[in-house]
Image: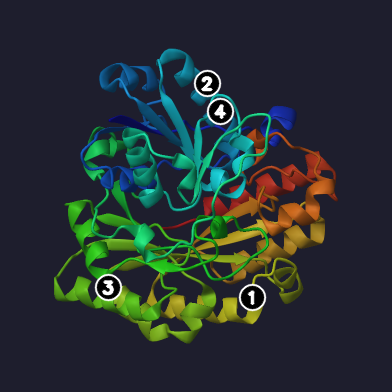
Amino acid sequence: MNILLVNPPNCGRSIPEERYGIDSIKQIFRGEPLALEALAGNLEGHEVGIVDLKAEPGGLQSAINDLRPELVALTGVTCEANTVLRLAGEIKESVNNVTVVVGGIHASNDPLFFNRPQVDYVVLGLGKASLQELVAALEQGTDTRAIPGVMKTNPGHRPGYAARNYSTADLVDDKAPRYDLVARYRDSYVLSSLGIKMGFVSTAFGCPFNCGFCCIGGLTGGRYLTHRTEAVLRDIRLLGDIPVIRLLDANTFGDPGQARDIAARLQAENIRKQYLADVRSDTVVRHPELMKQWKEAGLRAVIIGFEEIDDLALARMNKANKAATNTAAIEILHELGITIVGDFIVSPEYREPEFDRLERYIAEHEIDLPMITVLTPLPGTALHGEMQDRLTETNLDYYTLTNAVTPTALGDELFYQRYADLVKKCHAKARL
């Protein structure tokens, strides 16, 4: 079967830019579509292609003409969901008898959004195994509705589907990502602050925590699944001479034993690269020796979701962490010389004192690269269930994490001006 995997173009809309002319809060990063590369790795025996519309915005039709796909699968986050539907419709119109499949984080958390005529199947959660099973069933003419984690659409009706009990088997560790399928885009995948190429590798999927705002749980049903050490090392080697590796997981060191093993192998095999990894602050505090080991193995920076700066706000998010732990982690990382990329979330309920307090905290604690988003109730999250009746914007194009989609305490224009000013100040001093 000829199969085309599609990464949607940069999209999403900006309320502050459209309404108030404030464009300084745009945060666009282009990295390789690792999820599609992983899917392709488990589609042996098929002719598979990837078109990355973030790197090649006008490349869809030429990819279709070249491959003549029988199946097209698209991925997308929430702010890309409308664009994915539009692309699905265009594909249905231009390719005879094509099967259109949608997966990704939004499809996993809100599958009924894609129960439309232009979509044939929705793949929920980890799709590496289930997409392969779907392709096999389509080729063999067997019942696709029996595949766990795959929803056959039924527009106008509520389709049923079997839940998938995700396990490490869904990682399909013996099949490597098809990094070769994006070789023509490799020069686009650059860490802009350093001007050097960066590659993506996965060490784990999912997260055992249940933060109210987070959509990660939908990928694995709340389970935390780790790749085998040898699979991680294999993927790093496959990226060849690319000097910086982003370990693309929500909680890279969630299994300290696995993390120690990977770091030890990197050192033993003298694999000299720099790494960026997501880590919880309580992991840093509990395991400073692990951070030291990874620093020696090449860890350059960690991305930490601090989210808020006081315990009450963290508790409202169900963050399962404390402000004092965040501060202690910052001190440990500074001592080790590890760069801190700090994720903070501003609430639409912020007033002037909250903005001032966050700005002081970031400056006083010397966060190297603060990343500041707006609290957004993404469909499928606990936060969305709590705030659904307060939504002032339901167009998913605006769910970019830089728009307020619930009422602002300051009024929209002043809120966005304070937000933009804070982002601008933080980025002016940023270092990575």
> Callout 3, which amino acid?
Ile
Of residues 230 and 42, the one nearer the viewer is 42
Q: Is residue 201 left or right of residue 97?
A: left
Question: At 32% from the left edge and 31% from the top edge, which residue is drawn?
Answer: 3
Q: Are marks 4 and 3 in contact (CB under 8 Å)?
A: no
Residue 202 visible = no
Question: In the rendered structure, are the residues bearing label 2 and label 4 in contact, judged by CB atoms less than 8 Å apart?
Answer: yes
- Nearer to the camera, 71 or 20: 71
Q: Which residue is mark 4?
A: 85
Q: Answer with mark 1 or mark 4, whichever residue precedes in sequence.
A: 4
- Please tell me how crowded label 4 is: few (under 14), some (14-19), or many (20+) other residues with Cα within 10 Å: many
The numbered mark, 3 or 2, whose residue comes first in the sequence reads 2
Labels 3 and 2 touching (C-beta < 8 A):
no
Q: Quadrant of the C terminus?
A: bottom left
Q: Is residue 43 left or right of residue 304?
A: left
- N-terminal of the two: label 2 or label 1? 2
Task: Classify 11 as above or below 124.
Answer: above
**Residue indicated by mark 3:** 262
Q: What residue is disc 1 on?
A: 320
Q: Tell me the distance, in whole angstroms, between the alpha carbons under discs 2 and 1.
A: 42 Å
The amino acid type, in three-letter code, at marker 1 is: Ala
Question: Which of the two marks, 2 or 1, is nearer to us in this view?
Answer: 2
In x, y percent, where is residue 387? 79, 52
